[in-house]
Amino acid sequence: MARKAKRPARLQVSLGAEERELVTLIAETMNQSQSSIVAELVEMALPALRVMVEALKVVKEQPREAQRLVQNYGNEAVQQLAQGALDLDAAITADGRTMKGKRARRAGGRASP
């Protein structure tokens, strides 16, 4: 007797009006079913979902470690933002020029000599 191919598990999903409209538009444009579009979207999101699962495990099993990781991430983001502000300030104020090759304007509206 021939074995039947295993069918993917079905899942009922409720979408809001905006999400449903977008999925419908994509499905019509690509000439595919809405369920195949949703399945592809979930498949594309799998790497991010796996990372999320691991992060949630850390939060649940090791809350102090999770707090430390979030704090480190926040500190790194603040440092990058501060460095970006310093770099921007240096670019603006270097040699009295506002942009590379451009001179700062005087109060009268004319470029400085």
Image (tube, helix red, strand yellow):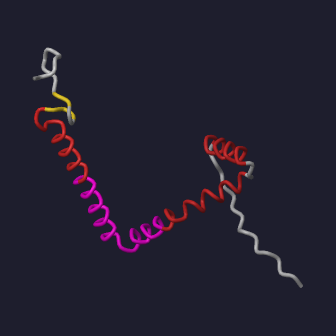
Against 67, residue 33 (above or below) is above
**Part of the protein shown in magenta:** 51-79
Please name whichever residue, 15 or 31, is drawn nearer the observer in this view of the structure: 31
Q: Say whether residue 75 is left or right of residue 5.
A: left
Q: Say whether residue 48 is left or right of residue 97.
A: right
Q: Quadrant of residue 17?
A: top right
The residue that appears at 46% across and 66% down in the rendered structure is 51
The residue that appears at 55% across and 60% down in the rendered structure is 45
Please name whichever residue, 60 or 73, is drawn nearer the observer in this view of the structure: 73
Which quarter of the image is occupied by the N terminus? Answer: bottom right
The residue that appears at 69% across and 58% down in the rendered structure is 12
Question: Is residue 106 shown in magenta?
Answer: no
Question: Is residue 52 shown in magenta?
Answer: yes
Against 101, residue 78 (above or below) is below
Q: Quadrant of residue 89?
A: top left
The residue that appears at 26% across and 63% down in the rendered structure is 72
**Chief secondary structure of the magenta span?**
helix
Residue 50 picture location, percent across and down: 50, 68
